[in-house]
Every structure is written in C-alpha cells, then in structure tokens.
Image (cartoon, rainbow, N blue to C red):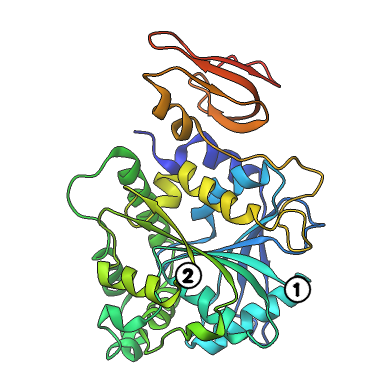
Amino acid sequence: MEEIKESPDYTWFRSTVPLKRIIVDDDDSKVWSLYDAGPKSIRCPIVFIPPVSGTAEVFFQQMLALTGWGYRVISLQFPVYWDLMEFCDGFRKLLDHLQLDRVHIFGASLGGFLAQKFAEFTCKSPRVHSLILCNSFSDTSIFNQTWTANSFWLMPAFMLKKIVLANFAKGPVDPEMAGAIDFMVDRLESLNQRELASRLTLNCQNSYVEPHKIKDVAMTIIDVFDQSALSLEAKEEMYKLFPNAKRAHLKTGGNFPYLCRSADVNLYIQIHLRQFHGTRHAAINPAMPGFFLLSATSFLEPFSHAYAVIHMGLAVTIRSRRSNTLIPLEIRSWTKVPGEEATLQTNHSIMG
C-alpha cells in the first residue's frame, strides 16, 4: 500500500496549505505551528489538537475535506509546556492573536484532554463552543504514570519514544491502519526530546476534568471498538461524566481513525458541526450549501448488492481510480443495480 506521506492527497496538502509559526508568549522559544485553511471571515472555526505522537499534519485529510466544503479549519502543534494551566494560558493568547472569540475543538487522545481542560479553564468567559473528543480521556490516572510524570524531562529521546510506541497497535492490522501507524511513527520521529517529554508530562501529571464546568458545551465522543490505547473502563468513564454527549462509534480504526478511517470521521465531524449552521458560531461559510460530506466507502458499500437511489442535493467525494485524487460532487441522483455499474448524475462529469 502507498505510504501516506507519499500519497497525492498529502503531497497536495503540503504544497497548497502554508505552515504558519506564531509566538504569543514572552518566551520566544515557545512557537505555535499551525495550518489555517478556509474562509478567514469565519470567526468560530474548528481547531484540531493532536495526540502525544502527532503534529499539525496528522489532520491533513480533515483539512482537505472540510475546507473543500466551506469550513474554516485550523490544525495546530503546540510548543513546549510543562503545566496544563500554562498550556491553557498560551492557547488563550493564540486565540486572541488570531482574533477568534470562540472555537470548536477536535482533540485526539491528549489533544482531547487538553481541549477539555481549556474549556474548563475558560468556563467563566467561554472560548470553546463545542468539543469533538476522539479516543480521549478525562483523568490522567488511567495511565498509571502520575508518579513518573515529573521525571520525563530527564529521560533521553529514545526512551520517551519507546514509551509512546508501547501504546501503538500490535499484531496484524489492515493496510489502512498499518499506513496510519507508519505515518504516526514518522511524525513521532520528528519531535525532539523536550517536545516529547513535555507532552508526556501533560499526559500523565495528576489531573482530571471537572465535568460540571463544561456541562453546557456541546460534545461528541468518537470511539473505536477495536484495539486502542484507551481501556474500556476509561471510555465508560467518559460516558458517565458526559451523559448528554453524542456518541459516534467506529467498528475499527485503532488509535488513529482520523487517518485510516478519515471518511467516517469527517462525516461525524460534519454531523456535529451541522447543528451550528445558520448561527454566529457556524464554522462554515454561510454562502455554502448545507451538504453532508461522505466518501465512496461511506455510501457505496451498504448498497453494493442492492438497488438504491440517493436523493438529489447530497454531497459526496469520490476517489478517482485513475488519478487517486478526491473529487467533490453534488449528487443529482445515484442508482445502483446488482451486477451493474453505478449510474450517477452530478454537477460534474466523472472520468475516474
């Protein structure tokens, strides 16, 4: 299978979306790295925060898909912070610098925990309008590393990477998941010792989310049913803390569903954001049609052996077999008969 970092989608992303570096703290060594794409007129975009092993690039598939349909998307990589309150203060300054009053946040693993803590940190003057938590947690004690959290800064980089890699999936996985793991290993190798040590410190220092402070924040929890770094008990605890949160489940996806099951994750993101369409906190350009974004795998597979018609006005992305690129389409009608190729009537001609 083609490596993600050599795929046309990733190459296109890196060649078209510039990486910005911003300093908001008094310490010039603390540099935020981020990709900001989509209409700059949107004042409440969706912001992606990566896991311990991730960088801003790991959400490139979400950026490509969502910006293609009019959303403003920011994917960031935070600098070295050794304390949760220090991170929250830095993130608040970043939003001030970008002139964003409120944001929607998608956080993966540690990114989700930081998103919850930031929502809690700003609860008296809210800066978080909604949360999407993917394979995330609410209490750092689940990792049983709170007693070593203050010693990560002493460990060499190779030992820190070994700690992170121990949580990656082991055993046979499908090609998409294998590609996602390889890509994340590559991203992990790009992090230096201080970056890794500080992230592990934030991930493991004794802390927990106070749910009563963020109970009014709209929330979607995305989980996978197969192997991931989170235990079933940790997932159940999230459900108990946020009983009103919407739940989105993936049968498979491992630790990185936003890479290996991007079409499904993108769909869940759009379903979550759709509730804010037409309000001042919409993350989408109001001039864009309120379509759903799906992928071929999301709607073709259920109808592969049956007759089906997809109604007019649905939006979809098709991956061209010829060029291996994503083609955004508006479906006028779609018909699938057993034993025959699908017939689509769209706003574009398809030659894939």
Q: Which mark is residue 112?
A: 2
Q: Which mark is residue 305?
A: none
- Badge 1, how many Cα within 10 Å: few under 14, some, many 20+? some
Q: Amino acid at mark 1?
A: Asp
On screen, 316 above or below 42? above
User: x and y percent of residue 165 in the render?
Assistant: 27, 63
Q: Residue at x 50, y 86 (%)?
A: 84
Q: Left or right of 168: which side holds 339?
A: right
Label 2 neighbourhood size at 10 Å, few (<14), some (14-19), many (20+)? many
Residue flagged by tag 2: what amino acid is it? Answer: Gly
The picture places residue 51, in percent across and down from the top left corner, at 43, 66
Tell me which residue sits at (46%, 35%) in the image: 298
| Residue 304 against residue 30 in the figure, above or below | above
Residue 101: assigned label = 1
Give left or right: position of 7 versus 237. Answer: right
Q: Position of residue 73 (x, y in %)?
A: 65, 55
In this image, 233 relative to 78: left or right? left
Vertical position of residue 71 compared to residue 103: above or below: above
Q: Quadrant of the N terminus?
A: top left
Whole-angstrom CA distance, mark 2 to mark 1, is 20 Å
Depth order, front residue of 277/195: 277
Point 74% across, 40% down: residue:
289
Q: How many marks?
A: 2
Q: Quadrant of residue 201?
A: bottom left
Q: Circle 1 sits in a helix, a strand or a loop, which is it?
A: loop
